[in-house]
Structures are given as C-alpha cells and as structure tokens.
Image (spheres, coloured by chain):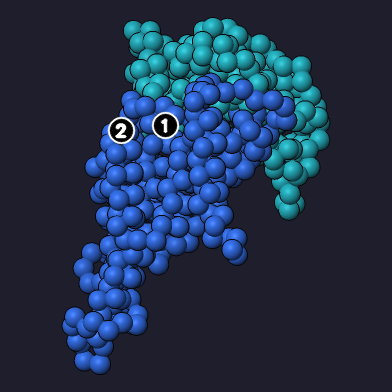
Chain colours: A blue, B cyan
C-alpha cells in the first residue's frame, strides 16, 4: 500500500517545528489570502511567502507540482464562468451569444489566486507535518485519544480502499473478469467490486478494532509518548504573533465601522 | 499458566454451542499447538483465551477461564493486554493505523499503558530484535512484506511482555519464507522460557518440529492431547481432519508396501524420519 499521507521526510528546520506552530503559520496564510484584495498581493503571497517556506522545508518542487495539479480545474471553470457571465464592458472574444470580458477574466483570476494560496497552504502543511505528530500535539493538550485515532484512520481510508480494490480486481481478473477494452466493459467490471470491497472493509474494521484492544487502546489513564515534539519559547511567541495578526486582519471586516 | 475448566460457549444468535465441556491445562513455558478440522472452534478458543470472548463477541460463556492467574471473563481487555497477547491471521489488519513507523508502532502499546519514555525505547529495541526486525525500525509499516508485518504484530504484542501468547494461524497468509521467519521468531520467544505459547496451526511439519504438545479440537471438543509424535504419528488422528506430515505419509506408505515394519507412532519430523528409515 502506498504510504497513506502526503508527508515527505526531510531534515529541515521547518519540519522540526512543533505541529501547532505549523498550524499557526498555515492559519496566517489562510486568513491572509481570505482578506487580501488584489491579484498581485495574492500572487506575491504565494511566490514570496509559501514558496520560500517550502524551499526551507526542501519541498518546493512537490508543492508546485501538487498545487498546479490541483488548481487547473478551478482555474478553468472560474476563468470561463467569470469571464463570460460577470458584468463588464471590455469584450475580448465572442462565442455566439456569449462574450468573454476582461473584467470577468480578472475577477476569475483573483478567485483562482485566492484558491491557489489556500490549496498551497493546505498542501504545504500536509507535506511537512506527520499526521500522527499533529494528533499527538492535540492529544497532549487534552483531545481524547479516540478522536485523534478517528482523524488518523480517516486519512487512511482512501489508500486502504485503493489497495483492497486492487486485490479484489486481481482476484476477479484471475477468474475471468474482463477489465480491459471499451469504456462500458471497464465500467461494468467495477460492479462485482463493490460488494466485496464494502463488506471486506467492514470485516477489516472488526479485526483492526481487536488489534487496537490488544494494544490496550481502551485503557483509561495517562498515556506516554515515545516521540518528543520539540517546542520553544520562540515558537510559542511566534504562534501568539500569528494569532494576533489573524485577528488584526479579520477584525476590520467584522466591525461595522 | 492456562487453566480452562468445563468451558462452554455459544455465539450470539447461534443455537448450538461452539465449545463443549472444554477442560485444558497448559503449564508455564510450554509450546502447545492446537490442530483440528475447519470449523472445529479453534479460533473461538483463541478468543476465549485472550478475552475477546466475552468482551468483544458477547454470547454465552460458561465455565472457568484462568490465564496467568487472571480470571479472564472478569478482567477488561485493556488490563488483559499485558497478560495475554493475541496474534491473528491477517498481517495487514493488525497494523494499528495510529503510527507510521515500525518503531513507533511497536511502542504504541506501551504508550497506551503509560510506561515511562525511558523504559519504552529499550523494550521496543528488545522486541524488534526478538522478531528480527531491528533493521526495519524506521520504515513505514505499510512498506513491509506480509511476513514482516506479521512479525511486527508479534513484536507489538511481545513488547507488552504477556505471560501467554496466543496465535491464531499466524502463517496462513504467508509465503514459505515469511512462515519460516515467523517460526524462527517463535522459537526465540519460546526459548526465553518466559512465555507460554498457544498456537493454532495447520502446517503440521512446523508443529511437529516446534511444539512440545499437540491438542486436537473437533466440533468444539478436545479429542486428543499428547506429544507431537504420539498425536500426528498415530493412525487414530488421521481420519479426523488433522492430516499428516510428509514424513509420516512416507513412513505410512512404506509400511503399506511392506518395505518397513513399524510399531508405535510413525515419525513426524525429518530427524525422526531419518532415524526411522535407517
């Protein structure tokens, strides 16, 4: 099975930060992208904010690759929809009754850039944070460990399903299921997959629950941790600073004056 | 170390009991193998020993179940984790999913038990060495082969130092190399003398080599109990879905053709067969 996370292991200062610091920085970028008014600002945030951070974390290329792969459907639909349907005067292009306007394109570009920063922030966070360390940070602060496990298990659903589906398809292929050829043939081949996949996954959950019990998961009492999440006064100040900045950015928009 | 007395068990919604009048006593340090035809109740017995019956599977359990001096039905699963460990068939489903490296996966049980951090590290290293996974400590559990994953499950259980280790066909889904690696690990565990091993297994050649004792379960009842050669080498066992090792089969055919004359149990292992045929 492919590793269930986007996380890339690197020996970087960014990776060594406490998970809550990484969350705070992400929050700052997300809020910043939400309040910034201009296309240039948003692109600058991505190019001079996220990318340098990613370079520090030695994950710049994966960030770019994933961001671009994720953004193009948004870009396409936003540019087309805003371009054709948003109000404006300067027509660039006509397609029958529809007119592609410059104001619309710019508006679409603005929305796209905002989403780019959001997606980029989320992607960067996942590239530099191990999910179990993030959950440990929360559990150390009092989050019930059952919830922490649910979050981790949810992240792994898709890779697990994919691995299981592959096994089931292989088994059925070896019994004569036709999986290549016309699109209709390939789609029909998926039908015998559904039952075993879902039932099998439910049975797997049973066994995994037993495995968790066998590791004393349901014991009530203080837990210890093998991994030490390093924190420092500097990071704590940085987190407060991020929080203050976020509030400062949001407050003017909430207050009516 | 294991003391079952007059144990009956019926699954919820089932009319007929799965286990009948089961009385079994396994002394400390013994390696006891449970064999028998399918649907005899072998997995059920494993669950009874490890507390999943009645805590997980409910149903009607009657009789006395004592493991390492602990009354199993009256003890919670969390407390039982440090007393009896269970390893089952599917290596992949025993990966907890809570940790993303082999070392941390093994440490997970100790973290839940609240063991101090200074103690966790050496115990994890010991457990990994015991099963031969020391070199893979930093790898993701998902990047292991089936045999390695099964040994990881074994290490995750052994790190909690249970007095009794119960295994339900741990090599059923493994290739020969993986099977050998698991049995080598079990040999090391048993040799330490600190753990009683109770194992359900179909691969009789391995059972014959490693087990001190073989018990046969048929339709929920114990029908035979003795040392491997007595049980697997005697014709009485064969018709009951237990099967024979290759060496026994060879000796049997030799006897049928009048090539050899044997009295008493036939050989079940390579060493015994070599001596037998000479």
**The disc label shown at residue B141, or none:** 1
Q: Is residue A141 above or below residue B14?
A: above
Could you tell whether A181 is left or right of B271 in the image? Answer: left
Q: Which residue is found at the position 50% from the left and 44% from the top?
A: A245
Q: Chain of mark 1?
A: B
**The disc label shown at residue A56, or none:** 2
Front residue of this view, candidates A57 and B113: A57
Front residue of this view, candidates A123 and A234: A234
Tags 2 and 1 on a common chain: no
Residue sticking out furthest to the bottom: A97
Could you tell whether A53 is left or right of B194 in the image? Answer: left
Q: Which residue is found at the position 23% from the left and 82% from the top?
A: A90
Q: Is residue B273 visible?
A: no
Few, some or many C-alpha atoms within 10 Å of disc 1 (few <14, some 14-19, many ≥20)? many
Residue B14 location in percent, x, y? 72, 51
Few, some or many C-alpha atoms within 10 Å of disc 2 (few <14, some 14-19, many ≥20)? some
Residue sticking out furthest to the left: A93
């Amino acid at each position: 099975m492919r590793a269930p996370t986007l996380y890339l292991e690197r020996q970087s200062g960014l990776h060594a930060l406490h998970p809550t610091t990484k969350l705070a920085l992400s929050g700052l970028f997300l809020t910043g992208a939400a309040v910034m008014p201009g296309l240039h600002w948003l692109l600058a945030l991505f190019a001079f904010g996220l990318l340098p951070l990613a370079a520090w974390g030695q994950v710049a290329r994966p960030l770019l690759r994933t961001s671009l792969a994720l953004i193009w459907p948004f870009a396409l639909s936003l540019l087309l929809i805003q371009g054709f349907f948003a109000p404006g005067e300067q027509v660039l292009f006509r397609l029958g009754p529809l007119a592609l306007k410059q104001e619309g394109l710019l508006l679409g570009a603005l929305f796209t850039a905002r989403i780019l920063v959001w997606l980029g922030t989320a992607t960067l966070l996942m590239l530099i944070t191990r999910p179990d360390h993030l959950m440990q940070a929360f559990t150390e602060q009092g989050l019930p460990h059952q919830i922490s496990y649910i979050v981790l298990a949810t992240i792994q659903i898709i890779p697990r399903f994919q691995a299981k589906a592959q096994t089931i398809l292989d088994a059925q292929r070896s019994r004569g299921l036709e999986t290549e050829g016309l699109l209709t043939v390939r789609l029909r081949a998926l039908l015998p997959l559904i039952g075993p996949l879902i039932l099998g996954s439910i049975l797997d959950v049973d066994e995994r629950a037993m495995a968790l019990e066998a590791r004393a998961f349901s014991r009530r009492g203080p837990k210890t941790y093998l991994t030490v999440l390093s924190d420092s006064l500097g990071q704590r100040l940085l987190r407060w600073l991020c929080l203050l900045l976020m509030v400062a950015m949001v407050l003017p928009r909430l207050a009516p004056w | 170390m294991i003391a079952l007395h007059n144990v009956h068990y019926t699954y919820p919604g089932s009319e007929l009991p799965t286990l009948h009048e089961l009385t079994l006593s396994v002394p400390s340090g013994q390696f006891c193998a449970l064999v028998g035809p399918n649907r005899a109740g072998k997995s059920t017995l494993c669950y009874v020993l490890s507390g999943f019956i009645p805590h997980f599977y409910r149903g009607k359990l009657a009789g006395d179940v004592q493991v390492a001096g602990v009354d199993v039905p009256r003890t919670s699963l969390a407390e039982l984790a440090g007393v009896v460990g269970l390893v089952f068939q599917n290596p992949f489903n025993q990966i907890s999913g809570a940790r993303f490296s082999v070392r941390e996966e093994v440490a997970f049980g100790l973290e839940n038990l609240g063991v101090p951090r200074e103690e966790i590290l050496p115990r994890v290293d010991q457990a990994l060495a015991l099963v031969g996974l020391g070199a893979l400590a930093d790898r993701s559990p998902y990047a292991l082969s089936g045999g390695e994953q099964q040994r990881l499950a074994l290490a995750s259980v052994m790190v909690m130092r249970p007095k009794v280790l119960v295994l339900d066909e741990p090599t059923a889904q493994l290739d020969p190399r993986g099977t050998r690696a698991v049995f080598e690990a079990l040999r090391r565990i048993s040799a330490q003398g600190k753990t009683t091993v109770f194992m359900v297994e179909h691969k009789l050649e391995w059972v014959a080599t490693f087990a001190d004792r073989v018990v046969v379960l048929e339709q929920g009842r114990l029908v035979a109990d003795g040392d491997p050669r007595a049980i697997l080498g005697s014709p009485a066992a064969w018709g009951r879905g237990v099967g024979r090792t290759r060496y026994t089969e060879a000796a049997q055919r030799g006897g049928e053709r009048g090539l050899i004359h044997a009295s008493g149990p036939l050989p079940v292992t390579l060493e015994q067969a070599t001596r037998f045929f000479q």
